[in-house]
Image (cartoon, rainbow, N blue to C red):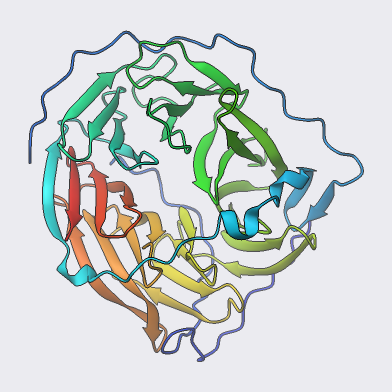
Amino acid sequence: MSTSRLIAALGAAGFGLGCVAQTPTPTAPAPAHTPVVQAPIVSAAPPAQLAVSAPPQLPEPNRATPFVVGRLEVRTLAPALFDGANGALAASRVESVPYERFRLLGTLRVGHSHLSMLDLSADETRLLTVSESEAQLRVYDTESRRLVTRVPVAGYAKFGLGEFLFWPVVDRAQRILFAGAADIRLLDPTGTAAALTLAPESGASLKIQSGLLGSSHGEGAGHGSVLTLYEPEDSPAPRLDPVLSVAASERVEDWVLSADRTELGIVYFPSLEVEWIDLKARRVRWRASAPEFTNSVDLSPDGTLLAVGGKELRVLSVADPGRSAVFAGFDNNIHQVHFAPAGDAVAASSYDGHVRIVNTTAENGTLSLRKDLRHAGTANVYAFRFTRDGRRLYSCSGDRTLRIFGL
């Protein structure tokens, strides 16, 4: 794999009011962080059962098409990766929101620390969260804020390996994807129905981007990893169709896929570099340094800006990464970054008790704060989600609460 580096040159021209590139020297990552309405509790249902059907196998690599690009060896690149991407997956326009008027709308007192996972269902009627210290899946109704179910999941233990996301297809059953130590399964959220194994992924982390489910996991020594993208299908039965399989010489810390599914952005560890890859042209478009302790990346709805969160929040121009801007007002590292649906702001949760919403335009290379949303004290704020219209934001924290902010 090529280890050459193309760090964007410093420049004063900006993608908003003017930005200056920042290029800190990569260093070792930070040590792992240890990180109001009481809803009625529904009696826990029996644990979700293990798989009842054989998982689909990833297609054999197409030996005619594999290629090496940057730090990736692309093993499988299915034609379906690009099918219907221009249009069907294009983001609809969302009106700008006055984030300065966001306020606390409600608090769900979960009562357990290490609330590190949170997701909204496709129809936004359900909210899931998982506390690593409780090791149970919790699902809430977003309108009533009532706890719908609380259930243990087979294969997930306290502070163990596991990640949860809602099935990304609109689904009356509100089924949930669980990536555990051995596979990716689809669960009935009540735990009463047997789980369905969808992919034999070991130790996977999950992310949904541009309509695809991505799974990344480590592969052997040397911090190598594998990233696989799946197309979720719901007919005639739920399944995950693999469309892209790549191996990296470093650990994939986080990744993003463009809306048309033709470009892939990856942050690597330990080099702490961002690599922007043109999948169709099979080449690296650019490389740039990431902030220290980078943990999360996101792409703006229009595909023009890339947000990278670590010790600081950095926003890069995808067309010219030398044009970048920074917000550095954090007392501890960032956990997640997400663009607001309107694309005019980006939010970052951090290990200092805050979710900060900042402008995507900059003056003299600096991004300005639009709203500071707070949990209690300095407890880690982990995952958060905007609603599709951008008018609400849900977040979870080590202060043992879920909080709802918005207008």
In the figure, is residue 118 to the left or right of 258? Answer: left
Total numbered labels = 0
The C terminus lies in quadrant: bottom left
Q: Nearer the viewer, residue 294 or 26?
A: 294
Q: Does any portion of residue 10 appear in the rendered image?
A: yes
Instruction: List the single residue furthest toward the right.
Output: 64
Q: Is residue 152 above or below residue 37?
A: above
Q: Nearer the viewer, residue 251 or 172?
A: 172
**Rendered location of residue 126, percent (x, y):** 29, 36
**Which residue shows up at 62% across the image and 38% down it?**
230
- Indicate the quadrant where residue 346 lies: bottom left
**Which residue shows up at 69% across the image and 61% down it?**
277
Q: Nearer the viewer, residue 407 or 158?
A: 407
- Indicate the quadrant where residue 386 lies: bottom left
Q: Nearer the viewer, residue 399 or 118?
A: 118
The N terminus lies in quadrant: bottom right
Q: Is residue 161 above or below residue 354?
A: above
**Rendered location of residue 279, percent (x, y):** 74, 57
In the figure, is residue 220 to the left or right of 97? Answer: right
**Which residue shows up at 57% across the image and 68% down it?**
289
In the figure, is residue 405 to the left or right of 301? Answer: left
**Rendered location of residue 86, percent (x, y):** 64, 60
Q: Is residue 185 above or below residue 251?
A: above
Q: Does any portion of residue 258 appear in the rendered image?
A: no
**Which residue shows up at 34% across the image and 71% down it?**
328
In the figure, is residue 266 to the left or right of 144? Answer: right
**Rendered location of residue 106, percent (x, y):** 11, 47
